[in-house]
Image (cartoon, rainbow, N blue to C red):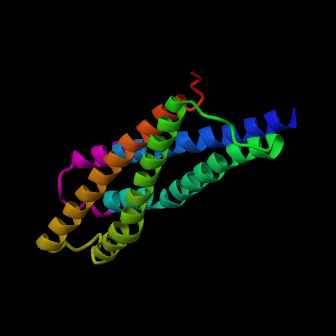
């Protein structure tokens, strides 16, 4: 009974983290696409909201990934605690687990690139903009080029998150 309760709690937290991992890039993508209709010209107030929103989501993404790892490790350890051995997985489940871990790892790599390379560069560039002055055209072009790179990486992250969700469905597969 206790094993099932612990497993269920871990699974609920794991699934919420999975949905969060998929929802963040999905909603960020929609925000960026809506902003894109105004073209690569800086609209200070609008772009400030976009940057604050996108960069403000970083802690949530990190929390979701950490929760994914902790609960993902916790479920087999829970089984081990009650049975003295890890659960034997089918071949389909092993392949699904490997794929899931690869896609999660890919998401982590993308997050590091965005959070620790691209976002600081965007912050530095955006700090040079103001609501009253027109930006230098080259800096503005570089800003939108870097935003485009972030958008591309977020789209890859969204695809990876979808594959994580799909592979998760096959983890309980029995031969």
Q: Which of 69/65 is in front? A: 69
Q: Residue 81, percent across and down?
A: 80, 46
Which residues, given as a range, are shown in magenta? 30-44
Quadrant of the drawing holding the N terminus: top right
Q: Is residue 121 above or below residue 152?
A: below
Q: Residue furthest left?
A: 137
Identified at 12% across, 70% down, the residue is 137
Q: Give the number of callouts.
A: 0
Taking the magenta stretch, the answer to whether it contains residue 121 is no
Q: Residue 58, percent across and down?
A: 48, 60
Q: Which of 28/83 is in front? A: 83
Give the side of residue 3 with respect to residue 45, left or right.
right
Give the side of residue 42 with respect to residue 154, left or right.
left
Identified at 35% across, 45% down, the residue is 29
Question: Can residue 85 be seen in this snapshot?
Answer: yes
Q: Residue 54, percent across and down?
A: 41, 56
Identified at 30% across, 44% down, the residue is 34
Q: Is residue 101 above or below residue 135?
A: above
Q: Residue 23, percent across and down?
A: 47, 41
Q: Quadrant of residue 148?
A: bottom left
Question: Can residue 49 be seen in this snapshot?
Answer: no
Give the side of residue 136 with respect to residue 97, left or right.
left
Q: Which of 27/46 is in front? A: 27
Q: Residue furthest top?
A: 175
Q: Is residue 30 above or below residue 172?
A: below
Quadrant of the drawing holding the C terminus: top right
């Amino acid at each position: 009974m206790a094993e099932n309760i612990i497993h269920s709690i871990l699974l609920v937290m794991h699934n919420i983290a999975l949905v969060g991992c998929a929802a963040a890039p999905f909603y960020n993508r929609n925000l960026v696409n809506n902003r894109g209709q105004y073209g690569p010209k800086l609209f200070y107030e609008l772009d400030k909201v976009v940057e604050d929103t996108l960069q403000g989501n970083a802690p949530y993404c990190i929390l979701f990934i950490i929760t994914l790892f902790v609960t993902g490790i916790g479920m087999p350890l829970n089984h081990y605690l009650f049975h003295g051995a890890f659960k034997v997985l089918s071949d389909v489940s092993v392949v699904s687990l490997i794929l899931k871990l690869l896609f999660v790892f890919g998401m982590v790599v993308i997050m590091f690139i965005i959070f620790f390379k691209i976002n600081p560069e965007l912050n530095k560039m955006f700090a040079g903009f103001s609501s009253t002055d027109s930006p230098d055209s080259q800096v503005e072009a570089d800003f939108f080029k870097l935003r485009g790179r972030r958008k591309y990486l977020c789209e890859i992250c969204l695809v990876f998150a979808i594959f994580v969700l799909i592979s998760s469905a096959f983890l309980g597969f029995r031969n």
